[in-house]
Structure formats: C-alpha cells, structure tokens
Image (cartoon, rainbow, N blue to C red):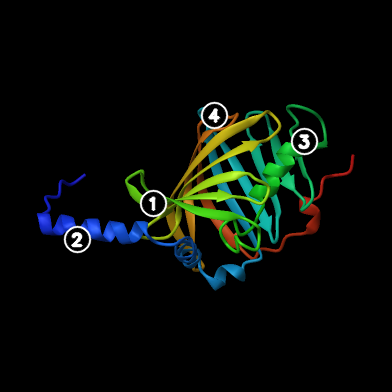
C-alpha cells in the first residue's frame, strides 16, 4: 500500500468528509445501494441463474443457483468425486433438499432451516422496500472492511432475526454480510465478504464471495456466469413427489 503524507489542511478536509459520510441517513444509504444495483432496472429483473464454483476443503464443486420473484430459489451443488448432486430449495412456502450421501429422495427441511431458506430466497434482499417488509434498519457507524470504508447497517427483520450489512461508502454495494442461520444443525454465525463486482446487463454483481462460519467451514465461491430473466419452470422449485 502506498504511504501518503498529508498536510494538516488536507487531513482536516478528509475528517470533515468522513463526518458527512457517517452522518448519512439510512434512507440515503439504502437509496445509493439500490442505485448501485441498477435502480429501477433491477425491478424489471424477474429471475436469475448463476453458475459458479465452490472451493471447500481443497475441493472444487460446480454450483448453480436459480431464483425467481418473489422468493423462489434453488441451488444445486455437484460433488464430482461422489458423482452426486446436492439440492436445497425454497418453493415459496417450505424448504426442501436432496442429499444422496445422507438419505435417498427429497426431504422437507426442519422449521428453522426453512426460515433461513425463506430469508435467503428474498429476491430483493433485506434493504429494498425494507419498511414495507417490516424490517428496521439502523446505522451503526462506518468501519474498514478489507481496506474499504463501509457503512455498517444493523437490520432487524420482522421475524426478529438480525443481519449486519456493510455498504461501500463510495460505490454503494455490499462488501460484507454477517448473520446467524440455522440449517437444521443449530444456529451458527456466518460472515460473507463480497468483491470483484462486475456489470452484467447494467446490474453490478459480485463475482467473488468468501464465507467464514457455518457447518461446512471456510469456503469461497467464484462466479462464472450470471443470466437475468431466464425462463424458469415452476416445477424446478417444487419438491419431487416420492
């Protein structure tokens, strides 16, 4: 990192700028975040398909995530060495999964895991239209996240669940998320760092995510391709009948 020597006057000016940034209201920060995501163009997006690779414990696992408004989601992770695919999905009402290494066929997720899946499946995330969703957002302050100055927002959801989001002061995009989830094995704290943002059809998308916490341990996800407004059949999100 370059060493920059600043005069007292320049330091004072920067401190003044920092004070203004810290004093930004919740709605100003949320509005900048919405604009960074594409603004009204984002509202025209009805579905997404993301193709990625997970790096976990020395293994590279191909992954596909398909989502559709308002809260339908499915993720498929292929385990090449076992020649199996693990599925987790939310059909708008319940969560379900398929893990051939644990049990045959599809099974409904426990209530706590379903709530976590429902939260993850929110197509717009917790900030867009947060008041209509019953969420409360507070500005905790500004913090450094991997060298980036970020607004620290505390989001208390209608369910009582708390999530912390860190929004890049300059770009308005999320650079970190901290939340507690329960996928059936107990509550665990999960931290996700987002980086390598690239424009896709006018929408900024993070192409790198690093995750710490959770039952699987540290992992990273590298995105290869993102597609918007793909045709998705309802059956993709429905739990297969036994």
Q: Do the residues labelled 4 and 2 touch (CB within 8 Å)?
A: no
Q: Residue 110 carries which label?
A: 3
Q: Name which of mark 4 and mark 2 comes first in the sequence.
A: 2
- Residue in view at x 73 percent, y 27 percent: 101
Q: Are marks 4 and 1 in contact (CB under 8 Å)?
A: no
Q: Name which of mark 4 and mark 3 comes first in the sequence.
A: 3
Tell me the distance, in whole angstroms, between the alpha carbons under discs 3 and 1: 35 Å
Residue labelled with disc 1: 150
Image quarter of residue 87: top right
Tell me the distance, in whole angstroms, between the alpha carbons under discs 2 and 1: 19 Å
Q: Name which of mark 3 and mark 1 comes first in the sequence.
A: 3
Q: Name which of mark 4 and mark 1 comes first in the sequence.
A: 1
Q: Determine whether 89 is above or below 43 in the image.
A: above
Q: Residues within 10 Å of mark 2 (few under 14, many from 20)?
A: few
- Residue in view at x 77 percent, y 53 percent: 92
Q: Nearer the viewer, mark 4 or mark 2?
A: 2
Badge 4 marks a residue whose secondary structure is: loop
Q: Which of marks 4 and 1 is in front?
A: 1
Q: Residues within 10 Å of mark 4 (few under 14, many from 20)?
A: few
Q: Do the residues labelled 2 and 1 touch (CB within 8 Å)?
A: no
Residue labelled with disc 2: 13
Q: Do the residues labelled 3 and 1 touch (CB within 8 Å)?
A: no
Q: Name which of mark 2 and mark 1 comes first in the sequence.
A: 2
Tell me the distance, in whole angstroms, between the alpha carbons under discs 3 and 2: 54 Å
Tell me the distance, in whole angstroms, between the alpha carbons under discs 4 and 1: 25 Å
- Residue 191, image x, y percentages: 50, 39
């Amino acid at each position: 990192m370059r060493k920059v020597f600043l005069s007292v006057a320049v330091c004072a000016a920067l401190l003044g700028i920092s004070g203004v940034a810290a004093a930004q209201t919740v709605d100003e920060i949320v509005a900048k975040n919405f604009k960074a995501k594409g603004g009204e163009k984002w509202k025209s997006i009805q579905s997404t398909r993301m193709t990625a690779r997970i790096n976990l414990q020395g293994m590279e696992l191909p992954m596909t995530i398909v989502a559709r408004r308002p809260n339908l989601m499915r993720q498929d992770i292929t385990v090449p060495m076992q020649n199996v695919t693990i599925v987790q999905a939310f059909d708008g009402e319940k969560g379900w999964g398929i893990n051939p290494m644990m049990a045959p066929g599809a099974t409904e997720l426990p209530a706590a895991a379903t709530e976590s899946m429902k939260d993850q499946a929110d197509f717009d995330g917790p900030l867009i239209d947060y008041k209509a969703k019953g969420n409360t957002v507070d500005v905790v302050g500004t913090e450094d996240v991997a060298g980036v100055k970020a607004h620290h927002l505390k989001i208390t959801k209608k369910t009582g669940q708390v999530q912390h989001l860190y929004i890049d002061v300059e770009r308005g995009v999320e650079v970190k998320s901290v939340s507690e989830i329960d996928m059936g094995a107990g509550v665990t704290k999960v931290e996700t760092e987002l980086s390598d943002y690239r424009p896709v059809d006018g929408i900024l998308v993070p192409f790198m995510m690093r995750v710490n916490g959770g039952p699987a341990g540290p992992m990273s996800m590298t995105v290869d391709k993102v597609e918007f407004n793909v045709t998705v059949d309802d059956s993709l999100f429905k739990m297969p009948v036994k």
